[in-house]
Amino acid sequence: MAHAAPVAPRRHWQATGTDHAMKGQLTRALLLGLVYGVWAAFMRRDTGGVTTGNVFYGILCGVVFAGIMFSLARFGPRLMQELHAAAYGAFGGIAVGYLYSMADHSIVRSCWVGFITGAGIGLAAFYRYHTRDP
């Protein structure tokens, strides 16, 4: 009877699931932080010329946004689903309300837009977490 020849064990050098997930979280946070920083710098410019202050302000806003986004993606799953969704809602509402306030709108209107946006993001995150419950 014929038998299969023994084969040396092969090692596949692939990233583990946690490394791949962390790279995805970091990439998503950096890209969204870049968009947020450019948008904040553009709003701060107020139809004037681009200055060094505007560039640094955009970098600062982008880094803060990306840092919070990454920490929410990294440590948020340890929270209860309701708190995780509320954290994303609060973060989204504050971020949008801040950008909206930079367009010379009143504080009440900026708070209202931020609240509505945050409630929408929070409800969407709540729905997502509860439909994908393990």
Image (spheres, helix red, strand yellow):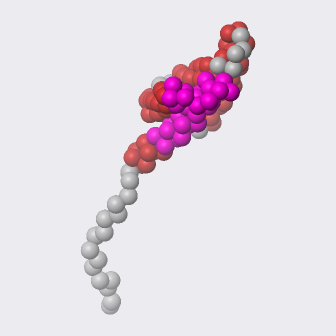
Q: Is residue 27 visible?
A: yes
Residue depicted at 56% across the width and 23% down the height: 91
Q: Position of residue 95 (x, y in %)?
A: 59, 23
Horizontal arrangement in the rendering, residue 104 relative to residue 22 (left or right): right
Q: Is residue 92 visible?
A: no
Rendering quarter of residue 43: top right
Residue depicted at 54% across the width and 37% down the height: 34
Residue depicted at 66% across the width and 30% down the height: 124
**What secondary structure is the magenta-colored segment mainly?**
helix
- Asked if the stretch drawn in magenta spans residue 65, the answer is no
Residue depicted at 59% across the width and 27% down the height: 40
Q: Position of residue 104 (x, y in %)?
A: 70, 16
| Magenta part of the chain | 26-55
Q: Nearer the viewer, residue 103 or 81?
A: 103
Q: Position of residue 118 (x, y in %)?
A: 65, 22
- Asked if the stretch drawn in magenta spans residue 34, the answer is yes
Vertical comparison of 130 with 15: above or below: above
- Picture mark count: 0
Rendering quarter of residue 96: top right
Rendering quarter of residue 108: top right
Vertical comparison of 72 with 109: above or below: below
Q: Position of residue 67 (x, y in %)?
A: 45, 30
Horizontal arrangement in the rendering, residue 54 relative to residue 43 (left or right): left
Horizontal arrangement in the rendering, residue 112 relative to residue 85 (left or right): right
The outermost residue toward the front is 49
Quarter of the rendering occupied by the N terminus? bottom left
